């Protein structure tokens, strides 16, 4: 159905006129052949970016030069974006970024891509063009570098992580042995990459349906500790339980929760990790709130959880409860004690998710109006009353609290 989209067909007509040619490439072809949903459609073309811009203009189609120096123009047709990139060939690589030249050679364009499954093209008729043996690898779900693995990795060390990312999402069985060896041999070069590229790959890897196998292989060949030394302490044993729990409870796969399950909740180390990998503010805040929240356990009463929620905020407590639940469920298979532990944690989690912060019923004005003069004393009294109010599980109302003023202000 994605291929019949009239908007895609319009892109083909635009590019294929007068001796030009465009073909769908990369993720769309790969996913479509694997029977998976297709989202972004990337197009490769023999036309130069300028020619693509010109043709778009002539036919009244919106074109944005999103990366014209890399050869990319985004065509927007009835709101749908298509990334159209001129065929390229590598002229020089330094292991971080390749210098490329535009070309009209499909074979060269295929050969500069990373993995065989990512180098398949589909022409305007829907025919698959396989120049590097990708089709057979798609069928075997074999993740394999194009050409000599070590050479391809030395051109761009990010490909080490891409190998494991694509294995996590699409691979089956064992990873290709040559690829695995080459990734391991080059692993120390991972620290030369820009943090943004590393974290962006890791995040995608951690978002896979089940990243567990890929992480195990990464650890096995010592790639994991190059990029996530924080995992050395706790290992990655929590992942299977977490993934199973996400499935059973219909939680959205959450790369950060998965990351949290394999690193210690040590505030200082987490700050360093956030800096090193350039986490977004939201990502750093998520992990920070988790590390700052107190540990939870299944024996806590509902009231105790309510107090924690009020005092440390819901986000961190929810993360703590989710991880504790995943660990308990991971061990629960046939174990009565862990089963009732997870049942209790599940209830606490539901409570935390539904929790609404109660409003402390009095303010500074109320205290001043009892005759206490404005000043730091007011804040102290308020804090004291609030503390009592929380300790008593939010039961006291305005009148009760104000009636206590006399007593506590003495
Ligand atoms: P998805 O978008 O689903 O993550 P994709 O295959 O489209 O998967 P992208 O990262 O969007 O992946 O890259 C598009 C294509 O560009 C890839 O399929 C691959 O052919 C090529 N490519 C991307 N990054 C590299 C790289 N570092 N080295 C070589 N080729 C690459
Ligand atoms: Mg893509």
Image (cartoon, rainbow, N blue to C red):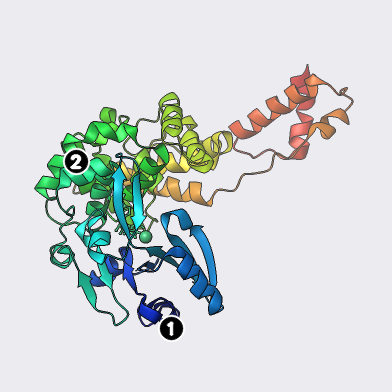
Q: What percent of the width, then of the height, locates residue 361? A: 73, 40
**65 over 96 or under it: above or below:** below
Q: Marks 2 and 1, how far apart in space?
A: 42 Å
Of mark 2 and mark 1, the one earlier in the sequence is 1
Q: What percent of the width, then of the height, locates residue 122? A: 28, 73
Q: Quadrant of residue 379?
A: top right
Q: What percent of the width, then of the height, locates residue 152? A: 21, 46
User: Which class describes the residues within 10 Å of circle 1: few (<14), some (14-19), or many (20+)?
Assistant: few
Q: Toward the viewer: 115 or 252?
A: 115
The total of numbered circles placed on residues is 2
Image quarter for ligand 1 equals: bottom left
**107 over 244 or under it: above or below:** below
Residue of label 2: 183
Left or right of residue 145, residue 398 in this image: right
- Label ID, residue 356: none
Residue of label 1: 6
**Residue drawn 48% across and 40% down?**
286
């Amino acid at each position: 159905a994605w291929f019949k989209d009239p908007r895609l067909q319009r892109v083909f007509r635009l590019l294929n006129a007068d001796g030009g040619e465009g073909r769908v490439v990369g993720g769309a072809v790969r996913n479509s052949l694997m029977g998976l949903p297709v989202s972004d459609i990337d197009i490769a073309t023999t036309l130069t970016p300028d020619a693509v811009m010109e043709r778009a203009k002539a036919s009244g189609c919106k074109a944005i030069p999103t990366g014209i120096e890399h050869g990319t123009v985004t065509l927007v047709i009835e709101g749908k974006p298509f990334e159209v990139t001129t065929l390229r060939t590598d002229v020089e690589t330094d292991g971080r970024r390749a210098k490329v030249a535009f070309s009209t050679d499909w074979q060269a364009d295929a050969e500069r891509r990373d993995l065989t499954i990512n180098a398949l093209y589909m022409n305007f008729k829907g025919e698959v063009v396989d120049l590097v043996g990708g089709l057979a690898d798609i069928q075997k779900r074999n993740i394999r570098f194009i050409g000599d693995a070590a050479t391809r990795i030395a051109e761009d060390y990010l490909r080490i992580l891409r190998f494991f990312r694509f294995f996590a999402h699409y691979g089956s069985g064992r990873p290709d042995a040559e690829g695995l060896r080459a990734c391991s041999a080059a692993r120390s070069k991972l620290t030369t990459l820009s943090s943004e590229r590393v974290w962006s790959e890791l995040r995608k890897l951690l978002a896979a349906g089940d990243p567990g196998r890929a992480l195990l292989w990464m650890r096995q060949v010592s790639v994991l500790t190059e990029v996530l030394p924080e995992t050395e302490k706790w290992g990655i044993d929590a992942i299977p339980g977490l993934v199973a729990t996400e499935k059973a409870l219909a939680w959205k796969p959450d790369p950060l929760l998965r990351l949290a399950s394999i690193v210690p909740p040590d505030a200082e180390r987490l700050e360093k990790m956030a800096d090193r990998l350039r986490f977004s503010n939201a990502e750093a805040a998520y992990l920070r709130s988790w590390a700052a929240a107190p540990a939870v356990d299944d024996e806590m009463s509902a009231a105790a959880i309510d107090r924690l929620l009020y005092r440390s905020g819901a986000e961190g407590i929810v993360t703590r409860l989710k991880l504790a639940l995943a660990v308990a469920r991971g061990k629960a298979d046939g174990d009565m004690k862990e089963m009732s532990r997870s049942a209790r944690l599940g209830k606490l989690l539901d409570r935390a998710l539904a929790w609404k912060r109660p409003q402390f019923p009095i303010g500074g004005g109320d205290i001043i109006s009892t005759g206490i003069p404005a000043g730091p004393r007011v804040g102290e009294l308020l804090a004291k009353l609030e503390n009592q109010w929380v300790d008593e599980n939010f039961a006291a109302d305005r009148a009760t609290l104000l009636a206590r003023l006399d007593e506590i202000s003495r």
